[in-house]
Amino acid sequence: MGFLSEVLGNLGIGEQQALMFALLLPFFPLLLIVNRRIRERGRPPLRPIPGYAELQEYLGEATESGRSAHVSMGTGGIGTGATAESLAALNVLEHVAAQAAATGLDVVATVSDPSLWPVAQDVVREARVAQGYPESNDPGCVRFVSSDKVAYAAGVMDILGHEDVSCNVMVGSFGDEFLLISEVGARNGLRQVGGTTSPQILPFVYPSMDQTLIGEEIFAAGAYLLGKTSHLASLAVQDWLRSAIILTILIGILVRSLA
Amino acid sequence: MSEVFAVWIAAILTLMVYSYLLADNPLYRLAQHLFVGSSVGYAVVVVVHNVLRPWLFAPLLEDATANWPYFLPLLLGLLLLTKARGSSAWLGNSSLAFLFGVGAALAIGGALLGSFLPQIQASWVSVLPGSAGGGPAAANNILLALGTIGTLSYFYFTMGVRKGPGSGFVRVSSTVGRWVLLITFGAIFGNRVMAYVSLLIERIYFLLGDWLGLVG
Amino acid sequence: MCDTPHPAGITECTQCGARLLPLGVSPSEVPLEPLRPAEQSTPSREDEGAVVEESDLGEGEIGEDVGVAEKVGDGTGPPWLRKLEATPVGGLAEEAAGAEKLERGELPDWLELPPDFDEMLSEAALIADEEGVAAAQIPPWLEALRPEPEEGVEEPAQAAGPTEAAGLLRGIRGTLGIEPILAISRRSVPVEPVAPSTAAQERAELFGAVVREPARPGVMIAQRRRVETLAASSARWMMYLILAAAAVVPILLGSRWSETNMTVTGGTTAMYEAIEGLPQGAVVLVSHDYDPGVAGEMIPQARVVLNHLLERGAQVISVSLTPEGARLSRRVLDEVGASHGYAEGEGYQTLGYVVGVEAGPRAVVEALATAGWSDLVGGAEDIALIVEFAGAPEYLRLWLEQVQGPYGIPMVAGVSATADPFARPYYRNEASRQLMGLMTGLVGAAEYELLSGEAGPALAGMDSQSVVHVAIVLLILVGNVAYFGGRLRGRKSG
Amino acid sequence: MRRIGRAVSVGLRRSLPMAMAMAIGSLMLLDFFFDEAHINALGGFFLESTVIIVAFALLLGLLNVLTVHLRRIIKREGGWIYSIALVSIALIVIIAGIPGPESAGVTWIFDHIQFPLQAATFSLLAFFVATAAYRGLRVRSLEALAFVLTAVIVLIGQVPVGRYLGEFVPALKDWILNVPSTAGVRGIIIGVALGTIATGVRVLMGFDRPYTSERDSTQ
């Protein structure tokens, strides 16, 4: 043990880093194994998440009413620590854009971090091209509002209040601006689905949203909405590791208590 | 004179925003558009002067041969600009790939180092009165552990859905988690209200003090 | 990822399962269930049905929704109809349907003109049922948290909750129930391929499916924007007025009740002691990571802590991860510095704005270590304490993850109340003691002012804060009284 | 010749970006694990480059803002007058900022226009919260009771009034924040970290490639 830590120390790896490594490593092989297993044996059953089921309905309603859907992709971007949340938002946008392109629904997606704008633009364009639309960017479809979070909220509040939106989807990394936007949505009687990862926003997601996605549920968008195998696999891996963590916590408590 | 004028402008803009409380109205919309516009302009100014100039242009202009690596972000940045047009957008894929690569690593590293590891270690608490430092502390620690485990298992996606060896545990544990989550949300609700009220008080001080001069 | 070569047309790598198609979704990949013609949608629904069915085996507590979805797999009609066959046991949907039927007699004559009106009405009732289904799919504990429509507000008929079938909404639903007629009449429109291209045809078919698909609840909300009644607006104005009065009156009166009635929390005391314990001339890195949105809380905090730091004779290096924070903190610094007779560069200096991505905090510390931005600091180890003012949790996280963790520098934080629940686990964390002290919001600043014996704006605002909190608690009480009153009334009349 | 062109184009569109994301992500990740000078320098350089690329993205964003609003002005779409205000103040700030963000013009606009607007918009939340509390915090079930009670205790316990009611109120508030709330937040944080890591790993393994808009427009 002492020898091992010495070797690691020479490599510039501290105890903390080694522990991190041990926590990270299982993800890679497990993801591959579970991915293959799902492809061979079929999908695992998923706990129902009403937010994703209802999103479908709300989009249908928006289409039928001839009004548009708004997707807020949060105030995080890519190339930062919020990349994972932004990817979840992109998965949701991919789903909404595909639906919209197929049915002629108008979609407005708004971003706050400029790094997310080109990616969102690509996702929407791809969805439209897949349905036979000409390859072009509609500047009004994916909008950069402002990199200032409160200004972003102000801009989105204006869109919700004055453009013919019937459905508001908010997934991504959010701060207090979430409540500003969602309250205006609720006041205008919009159908709202949303969620974020920050614990301090979640209590306010309920009163103003019709359907909520709590915490890590937003990362499941790719599995629930798009049915991607690798995303399903990653949910299964997360569950395996969740069990492992619970076990680790229990063992740690035992050791600490008896020490 | 100009100071008084400035305070008046700020006060009027503040009141324009508050007019939204009565109803959505043109004054409010004007204020919000001004806000969005100025924030975008400000962001551009800051980015050009605080990022692009010192981090990119200065090193390249000073000594391009010594600072040759900076041609990489310059190239990737310029390629990213092709995303403005749909037909040439694929040129910018590499720039986005760069951002996603860095972002993925930062997300993983940050989550491991900042949340995962410390929080797991923090949940290793003693549940025996002897080593925890008294009966109440031990009781709290038991609640802490149960709450953490319960909240964690509330989020199971694929386990406990079908009847199996662990489904009973998941069901019971996620029920505990639901309660803990609700209590947590209640607590956070209280906290957030406090934050918002503080902001309101700050604005009231501005309006009553700086503008009207009613309070010192 | 593997490098296996693939022929064109293969969508996923045979070796590693990676997608080979563009992310832009091709129609075959997207589950567009509700948009397909009802007959064809049976297989596509299978996945969803299977999922729910399986969940049924283990989960007794989701009772209602599972009971509904259970039948999805075995019926023959379109999925939405099959859903309806299993009308939920809960009385909610029945209540809604009942409300729908009651309205029938009240409809004006011109509305009853269509010959197949009965059919439509029953459809409308079914829609109401389906809404009940939708409502039941929400876990009950979430449902319990959903707000109710304000009394007197004409809310759109939402698939939200049981109570909406009562009160004012009844009327709305009665009129709206007619709207499906408009949609249904479109059913007869023949679906023609509008263009030779397959994609266009596919689109046309999908459109046709949408049109053909019998009225879904969506039609119910295809309505004008909600226009608030005067009663509802004035109820809201009343609440706003109460809140504004609660905040303004104590300030105007200049009351000082809080100063004598305040407790100081452990986190603030710990922070005070950490700073009190600094040796003379210790180098302290202060980061101002907030924007004007949280300035109301953060500036009083920064003011009192900086004051204390300069009093202790610490050397303050100030940075900011937000451009606004740099500007806001400069004002505070100059003000506090001047009160101690310092000019910039003597007892404190500012490095300004450092870009607030992960590069930020690390860059600061690494630059201190290598380039030596300051004569005082040779490296990270020379920093005695980091004081972080975090308006949002992500900034605190950056410092903890990128600096405190790797370099092990002691750190205290003043956070906005919003960031507090996020920060608290780090303060509570006895294993690694990531935060030595933690103060929260305007109250934290007031506590600190009390500890350091310098009454300032935070203490002065405390009375307002108290009264507003009491006002909000009263609003919650009134809301509940109204809710239970409404329920009692509903029980009597129903 | 055409095939070569196609291969190059596919390479540029798909293979190169993918290799880049995976390679750079892995190198960057190594920076977290190894405390070695070269890796640290490389990691630092990547971070700087990221900031620079995002700065270019902001220019793209500015372009989008201008396009959307200028189009609205030209077409006289709803709210075009406000768009004029938006575009003109943005341009004024940018022009005033040519000497730098500390220039007098920018400082004035920031202090007297942007700051009050931002603070006022944010403080609307105090009012929104009041109506949300009135509508949203109703005891509709036992679980909702837990939510409402906790919220009320924390609301009261945080301010000096709580102490006036009795020492137990702030004590109870502290207990709630320190025990159940800490447990809940910890559970959420660990769960979110799991999801974040899984998402990041998918990108590093090339399962998720949101950066490849690879559809061939020439086909």
Image (spheres, coloured by chain):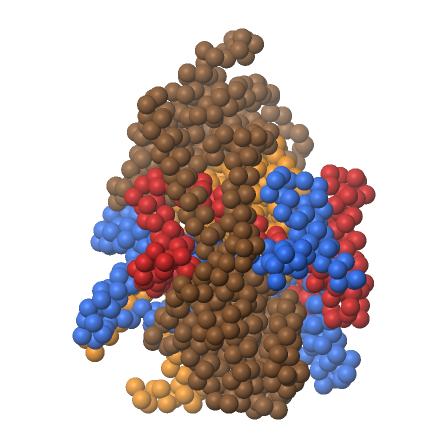
Chain colours: A orange, B blue, C brown, D red
Closest to the observer: B216 or A140? B216
What quarter of the picture does the C terminus of chain C occupy?
A: top left
Q: Is residue C43 left or right of residue A100?
A: left
| Residue shown at the point (44%, 77%) measured from the top left | C272
| Residue shown at the point (45%, 40%) measured from the top left | D135
Q: Is residue D24 left or right of residue C410?
A: right
Q: Name the quadrant containing residue C186.
A: top right
Placement of C35 over or under C51, stated as above or below: above
| Residue shown at the point (34%, 72%) measured from the top left | B121
Q: Position of residue A113 (x, y in %)?
A: 62, 59
| Residue shown at the point (63%, 56%) measured from the top left | B214
Placement of A22 over or under A118, stated as above or below: below
Closest to the observer: A167 or A122? A167
Is residue A220 at all visible to an observer of this figure?
no
Q: Name the quadrant containing residue B41.
A: bottom right
Placement of C479 over or under C387, stated as above or below: above
How many numbered marks does the figure carry? 0
Q: Name the quadrant containing residue A151.
A: bottom right
Q: Position of residue D47 (x, y in %)?
A: 60, 74
Is residue B210 at all visible to an observer of this figure?
yes
Q: Is residue C151 left or right of residue D107?
A: left
Closest to the observer: C461 or B84? C461
Q: Position of residue B127 (x, y in %)?
A: 22, 69
Q: Position of residue C467 (x, y in %)?
A: 46, 52
Q: Is residue B84 left or right of residue C428?
A: right
